[in-house]
């Protein structure tokens, strides 16, 4: 009887332990899912697309923008200097504005840039532009990029900001860029709002259901721009941006 009791007790301990392990694992996974950073979701979508079309990534970039009212400009600039001690600083000005441009380069060709544009007539109004960019994209590196952007948002932005994502890619071949953009438009279910077609250059603007953020274009909402150029150095370049393109194309 005693052995039977011990047997049942040991089984109960094992089962209870397994249940606790499952619950613990579930909690960890749930918290991880909640903590997932979505800053680079659009870049991931773009990279996946160009890889599918056998294009090579050239550059990627994410830009945050906001106009803030800052009471103590000098203290704010000093806080940036303390947060980014290795960043270079360039100060330029004209009759109307002063610009503070911080630049910081990390390993693996990842760059950070902070631009403060201050109106002399309204010194408390500051346009803040933060950009992180690179030439390689890996899921392993994304966790590092997220640390950079998390720090920047805490130091530079008080609440919400506007985000822009963009990549530039290329293929070492001349292809039909009109057909290319038509193919990508169908793939992403893009509702075309504007279209520019020149001899070696095509730009398509529209909206796609895969992304939420939009900008107003007349009476319509736009959240994607595609630009393709053929013939430069015997290659085809493809640039993708949301909600608009922020790099040269």
Image (tube, helix red, strand yellow):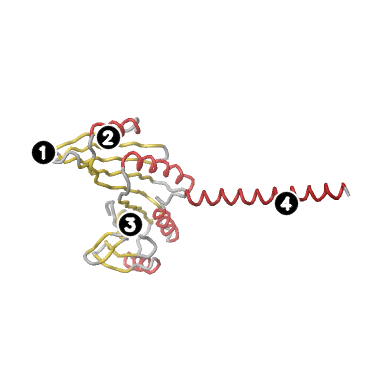
Q: Quadrant of residue 211?
A: bottom left
Residue in front for this viewpoint, 47 or 6: 6
Measured Cα–Cα span from mark 4 to mark 2 = 57 Å
Whether residue 204 can be seen here? no
Tag 4–tag 1 contact (CB < 8 Å): no
Q: Earlier in the sequence, mark 4 or mark 2?
A: 4
The circle drawn on residue 95 is 1
Q: Is mark 4 on a helix, strand or loop?
A: helix
User: Left or right of 91: which side holds 9?
Assistant: right
Residue in front for this viewpoint, 18 or 62: 18
Residue in front for this viewpoint, 41 or 118: 118
**Residue beneath the point at 25% across and 61% down:** 216
Q: According to the image, label 4 marks what residue?
A: 15
Q: Earlier in the sequence, mark 3 or mark 4?
A: 4
Find residue 152 and report its horizontal and vertical position in percent: 35, 41
Measured Cα–Cα span from mark 3 to mark 2 = 30 Å
**Residue beneath the point at 28% across and 64% down:** 221
- Mark whose residue sits in front, 1 or 2: 2
Q: According to the image, label 2 marks what residue?
A: 76
Residue in front for this viewpoint, 86 or 57: 86
Q: How crowded is mark 2: few (under 14 residues within 10 Å), some or many (20 or more)?
A: few
Q: According to the image, label 3 marks what residue?
A: 242
Q: Residues within 10 Å of mark 3 (few under 14, many from 20)?
A: many
Q: Residues within 10 Å of mark 4 (few under 14, many from 20)?
A: few
**Residue beneath the point at 10% across and 38% down:** 95
Measured Cα–Cα span from mark 3 to mark 4 = 51 Å
Eyeballing the image, is 75 above or below 243? above
Measured Cα–Cα span from mark 4 to mark 1 = 76 Å
């Amino acid at each position: 009887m005693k052995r039977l009791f011990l047997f049942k007790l040991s089984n109960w301990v094992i089962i209870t332990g397994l249940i606790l392990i499952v619950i613990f694992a579930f909690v960890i996974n749930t918290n991880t899912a909640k903590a997932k950073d979505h800053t680079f979701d659009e870049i991931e979508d773009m990279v996946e697309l160009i890889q599918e079309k056998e294009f090579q990534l050239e550059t990627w970039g994410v830009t945050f923008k906001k106009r803030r009212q800052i009471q103590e400009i000098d203290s704010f600039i000093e806080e940036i200097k303390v947060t980014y001690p290795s960043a270079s600083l360039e100060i330029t000005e004209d009759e109307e504005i002063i610009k503070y441009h911080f630049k910081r380069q990390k390993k693996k060709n990842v760059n950070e840039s902070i631009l403060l544009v201050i109106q002399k007539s309204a010194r408390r109004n500051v346009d803040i532009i933060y950009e992180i960019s690179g030439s390689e994209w890996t899921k392993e590196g994304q966790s590092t990029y997220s640390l950079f952007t998390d720090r920047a948002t805490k130091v530079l932005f008080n609440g919400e900001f506007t985000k822009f994502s963009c990549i530039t890619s290329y293929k070492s071949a001349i292809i039909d860029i009109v057909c290319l953009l038509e193919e990508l438009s169908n793939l992403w279910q893009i509702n075309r709002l504007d279209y520019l077609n020149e001899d070696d250059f095509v730009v398509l603007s529209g909206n796609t259901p895969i992304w939420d953020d939009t900008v107003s274009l007349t009476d319509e909402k736009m959240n994607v721009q595609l630009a393709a150029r053929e013939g430069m150095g015997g290659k085809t370049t493809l640039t993708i941006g949301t909600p608009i393109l922020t790099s040269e194309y």
